[in-house]
Each structure stands twice: as C-alpha cells, then as structure tokens.
Image: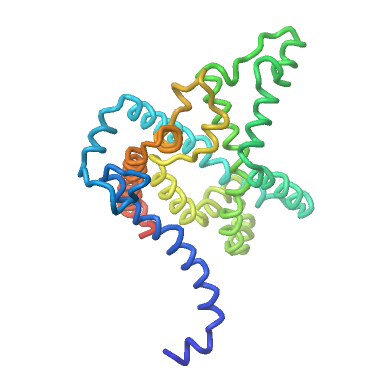
Amino acid sequence: MTTYLKRYWQLYALISLPLIYFIIFRYGPMYGVQIAFKDFNLFQGINGSEWIGFDAFREVFAMPDFYTTLRNTFMLNFLDLIVSFPAPIILAIMLYEVRFKWFKKISQTILYIPHFISWVIIGGIVYQLFGNQSGMVNGILESMGLNSIPFLTEKNPWLVTYLFTGVWQSAGWGTILYLAALTGVNKELFEAAEIDGATRLKRIWHITLPSIKPTIVTLLILNLGNMVSIGFDRPFVIGNTAVREYSDVLSTFVYRMGIQSGQYTLATVVGLFQAVVGLIFVLGSNYISKKTTGEGIL
C-alpha cells in the first residue's frame, strides 16, 4: 500500500484538492445546521444561543408565505424539468449528426456562451428585450400595429419568459455531458444500421438514445433531487413585485428571512427542510429508476 501511494502520489495530491474543498465548504458549514434548533443570537454565537427544539419548524410551517413559495418552487422546477431537461439531449443529438466539423465547432461555441454570462447581465438583457415600455420585442410589435405583450408584468407571459430564458442559458452547457457520452458509441453500429437500411431517425432511436440512457437517467435523478431547491439568481433577477405570486420561491424566502429580516433561525429551518426533502427525492427517484429501468446512481 505504501509503495502504491509513493508511486502515484501525484494522483492522490490532485484528488486531495476537491476533497479539501468539500470538507471546508460543504461539510464544515453543516455545523451551523443546529441554528435551526436554537433561538440564534448573532452576538452570543451558535454555542451561546438557547435551544428551542422544533419551535422554529412549527413557526415556519404555520406561515402562509412558506407554502406559497414551496408551491412556486415545485411548479417552476417541474416546468423546468419538462422544458429544459430534453433541450440539451435534442441539441446533443443534432450536433452529433452534423457532418461539417467547422459548423459543429461554431455551433457549440455559440451555444455554450450563455452559460458563462452572469444572471445579473442576463436579467438586463431580458428587460431590454421584453420590457413593456422600452423592450425591443414590444417595440417591434407596436411598429407592426400589434399589441404589446406584458412579458414581465403578467404571470403567464412571465412564466414563459422565465422558462425559455433558462433553456437559452443552460441547454448549451448541458449538451457537453451528452456529447461526451456519444463519443464512446461504436461507429460500426451506425454503419451496420445504415447498411441494413435504417433511416436516420431509426438510428437515433435504436442506437443514439440507448447509448446515452445511463447519462439521461443519472441527470434525471439529480434533477428530481433538486425539485425542492432552486437557484436564487434567476427568479430574483427576472422576477418583480407584479409577478411575485409566481416568482417568489424558497430561495428568495430564505433571503428575506435571513438577510433582510435577520431571522437566521427561520432561514436555517427552510434550508434544512430543502436538504432533507431533496435527499428523499434523490433516494426515491433512484429506487424507482432501478426498479423500472435497472439504472441508478446509488
């Protein structure tokens, strides 16, 4: 064992970096989970604060706003799963079928770029394009004699804008995983299918999709595990008071409770609730996936 460690010490040195990161930034903060069970005082610290048991949980679960944000979180994540999850799969298959390498490289670059743009910048772009008064899209519609569309001030148009903005930002980056899986597919399978007279659609259905099935299942399980969790940036930047009935989610609720109101105990309760429910979703979806498809992540 010692000889093996000495021989491959560079590899262990490399893997130690992500391990240290997770220990410090993932497992270390778990010490603060006990705030959910204490009447946390910023000046007394975690250890000096008084234990209150599950009183904070009862207070959170009695708040009408909590259930509104929970409903919105489930709704937006579920719609994202329907709209955004298939998008990178379709894009990856389309790029894989492209025969001109120069066109494929250009397309990949264009599709990946939005992933590296901050949501603050994307929010500015969205307001410049879809704003009611100064938005470019509504300006074009009005110049054509059509009525403007309240993309950002009415619930249903805002929801469509929210979903397709998410697709534009994330779909290109998601294709990387599927394209990586497709590179391992044996080319002879496609050649044999083509000789047997299989059309392109049949080759995609019977060879391409089964080849990336494990990747699809893994990412689907991870997405289901995040059904009760949602990023803060996107709903906060694109949302506004006019559509708060849809845009107010658990992450913005935690922001209001913890940062704006200073109720750190309540904010920690919601965060712990998200983590526990997310774990249940991951384990449940993994169990169902193993029973139905034979594929899983655990």
Nearer to the camera, 242 or 116: 242
- Residue 250 visible? The answer is yes
94 sits to left or right of 258: right
Q: What residue appears at the point 64 percent right and 60 percent down from the top-left corner?
A: 191
Identified at 57% across, 32% down, the residue is 237
Q: Residue at x 28, y 48 (%)?
A: 49
Asked if residue 68 is positioned above or below residue 202 in the image, the reply reads above
Which quarter of the figure is the C terminus placed in? bottom left
- Residue 274, how many percent across, how many down? 35, 43
Residue sticking out furthest to the front: 43
Residue 291 is left or right of residue 147, and the answer is: left
Q: Is residue 285 visible?
A: no
**Residue, far bottom:** 3
Question: Relative to the observer, which residue lies in front, 270 or 55?
Answer: 55
For the residue pair 65 and 77, the one nearer the viewer reads as 65
Residue 145 figure quarter: top right
Residue 141, position as x, y percentages in the image: 72, 14
Q: Quadrant of the N terminus?
A: bottom left
Residue 293, x across and y down, in percent: 37, 52
Task: Please name the residue shown 53% across and 48% down the image.
Answer: 205
Which quadrant of the structure image shows residue 259?
Answer: top left
